[in-house]
Amino acid sequence: MRKVPSSIQIDLADLFQEQYQVGDHCLRVPTESFNYVQGKSSKGKKVQIPSWVSLDGWRYTLLENFPNASGDVLFHPGAHGCVAAYVASEFVQGLPLKFALKCVNYGQQNKKGSPWVCEWRIHQFLKSHVSSDSDSFVQCYAAVKAQVQKVSQVYFALELMDTDLFTIIETSQTVPNFGRWILNCLYKTSRSLLELHRAGIIYCDLKPENVLVSMDSEGPIKFGDFDRSSIPVLNVGVVGGTKGYYSPERLLDPSVHTLADDAWALGVLILIAATKAASPYLGCTKESIAKFSPSNYLKRHQQCNWSDDVVERIGFLCDRLLQIDPSQRLTLPYVVDELWGTLSQMTEVPVLFYQDDDSFILPSEASDGSSAVTMIASPRHSKYSFKREYSGDDYPTSKAARTKCDLNSTWYSLLTF
């Protein structure tokens, strides 16, 4: 493999006068501006994407499309999202074959640092306090700060997962036995969140885009995108989040970051996964939330072909996770046990094999490759694309402008606020 010359960079460690940096590898990006293309981060900011990078001196080239993004989308949203993906021409022992590159403008810092500083510190904390083979978060291989066209940017080389929960929900009709698959995914998501909590991290921005998925149902579910997370005991974190997932206490005070707030967001995530719809709490007030019944909503709108018993058990979890009083919410160990118990009562969760041509295939079909279920690419990964219409008091908002659009031959509703 062709090695590339080192370029002049500043390691993130130097920014803090530390003796070590995130990850065990050395990341370098080109110095010449013609080796960059302009793109947008998942937050809509302009960033410079290098056409190649090097990790420990080995060259990685930019993939034309981010894995599992539709053909005309180069920059994928969500936890991988600021970003592009890179691949080496051959496997090198100790290095990943592919990785995601997160590109962030350096920006201004406040007392707690900018979001990228928080992400850097949290990855550093995870590396020091959590086993490197943990299945709860993506690995950060390396990070570097660079000057690109007179603009300071920060680059993170991150573990590349197959896709995210957002994409799975959008393309659920292509996933065999989706009801079993999603229940297994929710169990693993709650288990990963619990591991982060036990490490002292409050995630603060739990949503489908940030839940990274292995297409093999035996594989892990991991969290990425720690730029809004918090480590309260170390006073680390620029607390942020996404509306529609805010707990009632966070609606009143956006700076709230507690375990109970993460538990609320998990309850919202379960409703979204089960109904294949947007957060039912978009645009809500504390008063409208108090009138809303998560379990009734789940019974009316679940799209997973769950039995009445499973719907009742999941509805109970949602009711208890989505309590207005944070002290009354279920703890995550209970949620993990209950999801595992519900999953265990169902038949075996199928193993899905993810193929290079973006399709799923069942184990029984793997021998000859026939009858593979094609994965439908989402339409530009619009954040509105799996929302659908509701009526009456089962949708807890009085403020929704509904505009219908046809996506993948299914009627949806765009909710704008």
Image (spheres, grey):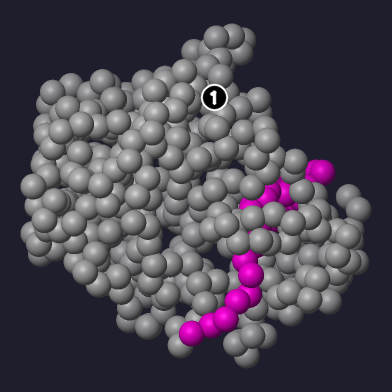
Above or below residue 349? Residue 72 is below
Quarter holding residue 25:
bottom right
Residue lying furthest bottom in this view? 17
Q: Where is residue 301 drawn, in percent x and y?
A: 22, 28
Q: How many marks?
A: 1
Q: Nearer the viewer, residue 100 or 254?
A: 254
On screen, residue 273 versus residue 338, left or right, reads right
Q: Which residue is drawn at 29% across and 49% down?
A: 282
Q: Residue at x 30, y 31 (%)?
A: 389
Q: Where is residue 199 drawn, in percent x and y?
A: 35, 68
Q: Which of 346 and 379 is in front in this view?
A: 379
Q: Give the range drawn in magenta.
A: 83-110
On screen, residue 267 versus residue 234, left or right, reads left
Residue 94 within the magenta-colored segment of the rendering = yes
Above or below residue 391? Residue 200 is below
Residue 137 within the magenta-colored segment of the rendering = no
Q: Where is residue 363 drawn, in percent x and y?
A: 49, 18
Q: Residue at x 39, y 23 (%)?
A: 411
Q: Is mark 1 on a helix, strand or loop?
A: loop
- Residue underneath mark 1: 376
On screen, residue 368 versus residue 238, left or right, reads right
User: At label 1, which amino acid type do we have?
Assistant: Ile
Residue 355 visible to the viewer: yes
